[in-house]
Image (cartoon, rainbow, N blue to C red):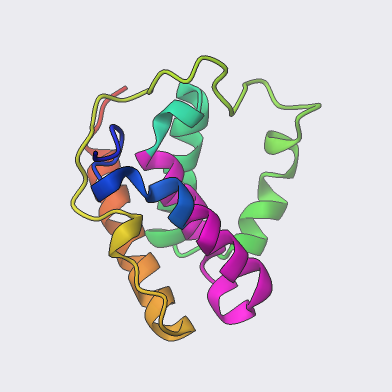
Amino acid sequence: MNCPECGAAEALCQARFDEFLVLEFTDAGYGAVHHLTVAAYMLQHSSKLTRQGWLHERNLLRKFLVEKKPPQFIRKQNKDLVDSGKRTFKFKSKDGVPVIDKTTWAKTILDVRTENAEVYCEDVTAWARFALEEAEAIAI
């Protein structure tokens, strides 16, 4: 059975995402693209987010990939915006209903190879670029 949100084969996307987080938190070479991994995954799994959260993730990915802003800059710039005590919107969905109708993406987390950090970073970046391009075509 394919994932109903991203279309990845056998719905292995959540397990793969969890595996990637472990890699990224235990090896700095893999962790260099953590900001892209999370944003791309969340865009493709919109049931985890509110509408505002999904739009925020899409905007973050745009800042990283198009505007070429480093994660440290974005973190500092968005400090108050994402602070749960100051934020004016919720990120996480409570109802689990997808924000978008898209169920098939050109690339998913299953297209990312993990054989070494260099290949991994290239693949995550390519996946994130495809996700952003497709997400920007979605009007919500």
Residue 99 in the image, given as x and y percentages of width and height: 38, 22
Residue at (43, 75) in percent of width and height: 121
Q: Residue at x 35, y 56 (%)?
A: 109
Residue in the picture at 49% in, 47% down: 60
Quarter of the view holding residue 130? bottom left
Labels in figure, total = 0
In percent of width and height, residue 28 lies at 63, 78
Left or right? Give the position of 136 relative to 55.
left
Magenta segment: 17-44
Q: For residue 31, which quarter of the picture?
A: bottom right
From the image, which quarter does the C terminus lie in? top left
Outermost residue toward the right in this view: 85
Query: Left of 18 or right of it: where is 85?
Result: right
Q: Can you say whether 47 is above or below 123 in the image?
A: above
The one of 63 and 117 positioned closer to us in this rendering = 117
Horizontal side of 124 relative to 133 (left or right) equals right
Judging depth in this view, the residue of 85 and 48 nearest the camera is 48
